[in-house]
Image: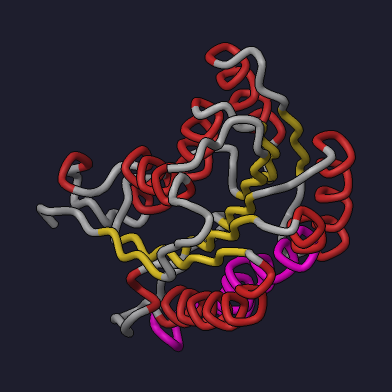
Amino acid sequence: MQSLKGKTALITGAGKGIGKAIALGLAAEGMNIGLIGRTLVDLETVSQEIKSANPATKISFAVADISDHGAVKEAVQAIGKDLEVIDVLINNAGILKMGGILELSVEDWESVFKINVFGTYYVTREVLPYILKQGKGDIINIASTSGLRGANKMSAYGASKAAVINFTESLMQEVRKSNIRVTNVNPSTIATEMTLTANFTDGNVDKVLQPEDLAHLIVHHLKLPPRAFVKEIALWSTNP
């Protein structure tokens, strides 16, 4: 297993939930951390927690709506300037909007794609040159088991995650020979603010996956020898 100490990861949706858990997990391994999120106070809180636990960690954060390419470009440039290198990109940011085809507004349907699909593309497009410059690295896209099959009133979210899965596969084929490992992660329900608001847990938060479960998986995946990577991971809870 390779050491992650001294490497740098950029994480989107890093202010809370899965992104925060991943940031804390990677920082505990000695990685430097770049954070992108929509809420300044959340990013400041995560940064303070990382610094308290790992004082030597270099941290840079930027507030950005990843559905805005210009904002993404500025955020990545700012973080790249602060941290100088980016070895790992984790595209985690995403939103969920539920409703039937005639119930969900056109604007809501489009917003899901703008963040989940276009946002993933925008961030990848801006970070990829940094990883190519390193001559190796990792890109991990957080999709969902919802992208593997359709479900009632989940057309926008499910279709967006299916697009992320296909995008990840295409990117993997494109950059694999450049020593860049691209992995798609499809978790089932994870106890986050998003899923709790949608009542996916039926009031029983303990029966579903926790953000730390996914963070633990990602840490160990990144530790695989550079010659090997897992192309696709589906993570499920044992008691749905």
Residue occupying image coordinates x 73% and y 55%: 65
Model colouring: secondary structure
Residue 127 horizontal side relative to residue 175, left or right: right
Q: Quadrant of residue 145?
A: bottom left
User: x, y percentage for residue 172?
Assistant: 57, 75
Helix, strand or loop for the magenta stretch, by majority: helix
The vertical placement of 170 against 117, above or below, is: below
Residue occupying image coordinates x 27% and y 57%: 200
User: x, y percentage for residue 47?
Assistant: 64, 24
Which one is in front, 50 or 2?
A: 2
User: x, y percentage for residue 190?
Assistant: 32, 51
Q: Quadrant of residue 62?
A: top right
Which one is in front, 176 or 14?
A: 176
The vertical placement of 28 against 217, above or below, is: above
Residue occupying image coordinates x 12% and y 53%: 238
Q: Quadrant of the C terminus?
A: bottom left
Q: Quadrant of residue 113?
A: bottom right
Total marks shown come to 0
Q: Name the outermost residue toward the left.
A: 239
Residue 3 lies in the magenta stretch: no
Residue 201 horizontal side relative to residue 63, left or right: left
Residue 35 horizontal side relative to residue 220, left or right: right
User: x, y percentage for residue 157?
Assistant: 46, 73
The vertical placement of 150 against 60, above or below, is: below
Q: Name the outermost residue toward the bottom.
A: 102
Q: Quadrant of the N terminus?
A: top left
Residue occupying image coordinates x 84% and y 44%: 80
> Which stretch is magenta?
100-127
